[in-house]
Image (cartoon, rainbow, N blue to C red):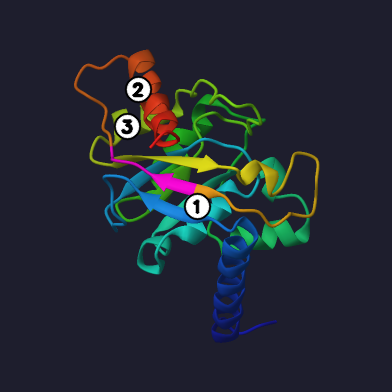
């Protein structure tokens, strides 16, 4: 059994390796459009193209922001196998969501808000699944309820371009490529704004970043 100090040292080393690997394999450039890296509590919401999305966005954040940010990831993928489970639970502090057994008393939104408290930010993917098409799919309602229950959180749109080709669907080994991750200006839920209107506005905020 590893003592606590040794375990923290191993975790820190694994975390540094994962950040370096994610940056290398994605070749990602980072752009901030009317937005700057900040330790304010935020919900980063992005289009979803690859299993690597959460790791790459997290890895591209500055260290002072990254340490306060938790990617939301699918439990059915990241809890499968010892390596994935170790990475998700011990290296990048993922918040694993069970997509196949959602119950009223186990609301993912309530769990996310409970886990972040008044300290951590989240990376979420409102499409709810990986999308290999050219258009961003409709957003699920979770982002709306996060904004409604925590109106103080900054909602930062993020567009991921070309990352789906780094780890194509059904492939196990990633292929190094150049991708781009763009962070946009924060938005908030407006007073009395209907769910459908807000979700369309949030989706459009992500889509527009591709054109900037």
Which residue bears the numbered disc 2?
Answer: 201
Badge 2: residue crowd in 10 Å (few <14, some 14–19, many ≥20): some
Residue under label 3: 147
Foreground of the two, 7 or 202 = 202
Residue positioned 47% across, 59% down in the render: 60
Quarter location, residue 49? top right
| Mark 3 or 2, closer to the camera | 2
N-terminal label among 3 and 2: 3
Viewport quadrant of the N terminus:
bottom right
Label 3 – label 2 distance at C-alpha: 13 Å
Q: Position of residue 135 (x, y in %)?
A: 56, 24
Q: Is residue 210 magenta?
A: no
- Viewed as shown, does residue 110 lie left or right of 97? left
Q: Which circle, 1 or 3, is nearer the viewer?
A: 1
> Decide: marks 1, 3 in contact (CB < 8 A)?
no
Image coordinates for residue 26, horizontal then vertical, percent:
61, 56
The x and y percentages for residue 9 are 56, 82
* Image: 180 above or below 39: above
Magenta span covers which residues? Answer: 181-186
Q: Is residue 99 above or below residue 60?
A: above
Whether residue 183 appears in magenta in the rendering, the answer is yes
In the picture, which quadrant includes the C terminus? top left
Q: Which residue is mark 1?
A: 57
């Amino acid at each position: 059994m590893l003592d606590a100090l040794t375990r923290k040292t191993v975790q820190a080393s694994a975390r540094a390796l994962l950040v370096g690997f994610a940056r290398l394999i994605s070749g990602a450039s980072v752009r901030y459009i009317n937005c700057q890296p900040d330790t304010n509590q935020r919900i980063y919401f992005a289009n979803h193209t690859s299993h690597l999305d959460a790791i790459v966005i997290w890895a591209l954040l500055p260290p002072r922001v990254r340490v306060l940010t938790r990617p939301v990831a699918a439990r059915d993928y990241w809890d499968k196998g010892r390596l994935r489970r170790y990475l998700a639970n011990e290296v990048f502090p993922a918040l694993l969501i069970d997509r196949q057994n959602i119950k009223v008393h186990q609301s993912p939104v309530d769990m996310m808000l409970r886990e972040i408290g008044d300290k951590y930010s989240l990376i979420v993917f409102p499409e709810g699944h990986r999308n290999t098409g050219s258009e961003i799919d409709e957003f699920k309602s979770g982002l709306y309820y996060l904004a409604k229950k925590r109106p103080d959180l900054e909602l930062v749109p993020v567009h991921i371009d070309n990352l789906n080709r780094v780890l194509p669907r059904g492939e196990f080994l990633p292929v190094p490529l150049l991708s781009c991750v763009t962070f946009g200006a924060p938005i908030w839920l407006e007073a009395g704004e209907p769910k459908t209107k807000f979700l369309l506005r949030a989706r459009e905020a992500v889509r527009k970043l591709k054109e900037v």
